[in-house]
Amino acid sequence: MLRTCVVVLLVVALCGATPLLRPTPGIRQWRPRVDGRIVGGSAVSISQYPWQLYFTMGNYMCGASIISNTWALSAAHCVDGYSTSQMLLRAGTSTRGSGGTTHNIASGYIHGSYSDPDYDIAVVQVSNAFSFNSNVQAVGLTSSEPSAGTSVTVTGWGATSSGGSASNTLLAVNVQIIDRNTCNGSYGYITSRMICAGVSGGGKDSCQGDSGGPLVTGSTQVGIVSFGEGCGLANYPGVYANVANLRSWIQQATGV
């Protein structure tokens, strides 16, 4: 039920970080989630979410977000097991797989404690820097966890239903942060490195292909698409890596 990851043959240069590796079955993108898309959302322009990136690893797709002119943030399960030569980021376009600018990956890290699905976070450094404009901007990173009930937005090109085909157009859906204890009642293994978001009764969610993409409030990222049971199921909200909890690791790995 994972939503995707990378590993690079690098020397581990910091505590708590591991060079990028390969995708692991289980998180939102690894089942039929290879091409998913937002469930219950609507088409949006990249200018509304200029930090959104289209991230491919061979035949697999994920999302990612720009956090500086040289670094991007994604999920560990998206990159785990892949070499940097297999990875490509596309910025500044609303259309999946075309337009904008492409960026090869020079290096990257996954969290040293990553164990699918916990600590599901990765950062990658691009070879050619992002050139900021109205369609390409860095997202802010939260240092405080949003409270239950906070309205948040998730974006991506993933499936509109579990096992569905990928969207050609960038989609967004508004959901709310779900209390961790409530979420844990559904899954049984929700840790402090995770936050949950959905709506009462289901029907709005991230899905296969959205893995690694940003969950934001305004222009601040609070989560990274990680996993979930199905897509948009009642009582099974989407689960996201908790940016606030992992903020110090991002800073240590990237300087951002």
Image: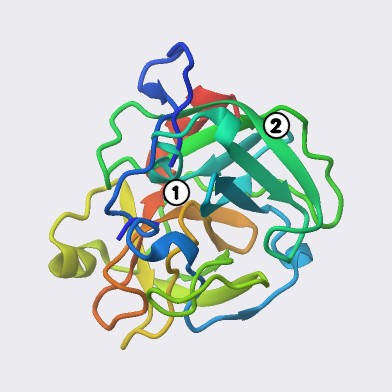
Identified by mark 1, the residue type is Ser
Q: Position of residue 28 (x, y in %)?
A: 36, 59
Q: Residues within 10 Å of mark 1 (few under 14, many from 20)?
A: few
Q: CA distance from mark 1 to mark 2?
A: 24 Å
Tell whether label 2 touches label 1 (CB within 8 Å).
Answer: no
**Colouring scheme, one of rainbow, by chain, secondary structure, one colour:** rainbow
| Residue 255 location, quadrant | top right
Judging depth in this view, the residue of 239 and 151 nearest the camera is 239
The residue sitting at 52% across, 51% down in the picture is 59
At a point 44% along the width and 49% down the height, the residue shown is: 144
When asked about the image quadrant of residue 43, the answer is: bottom right
Label 1, secondary structure: give it: loop
Badge 2 amino acid: Thr
Of residues 6 and 137, the one nearer the viewer is 6
- Image quarter (top left, top right, bottom left or bottom right) of the C terminus: top right
Where in the figure is residue 67, as x and y percent of width and height? 64, 41
Q: Is residue 113 left or right of residue 97?
A: left
Instruction: Please tell me how many numbered marks the rendered image carries.
Output: 2
Q: Residue furthest front?
A: 59
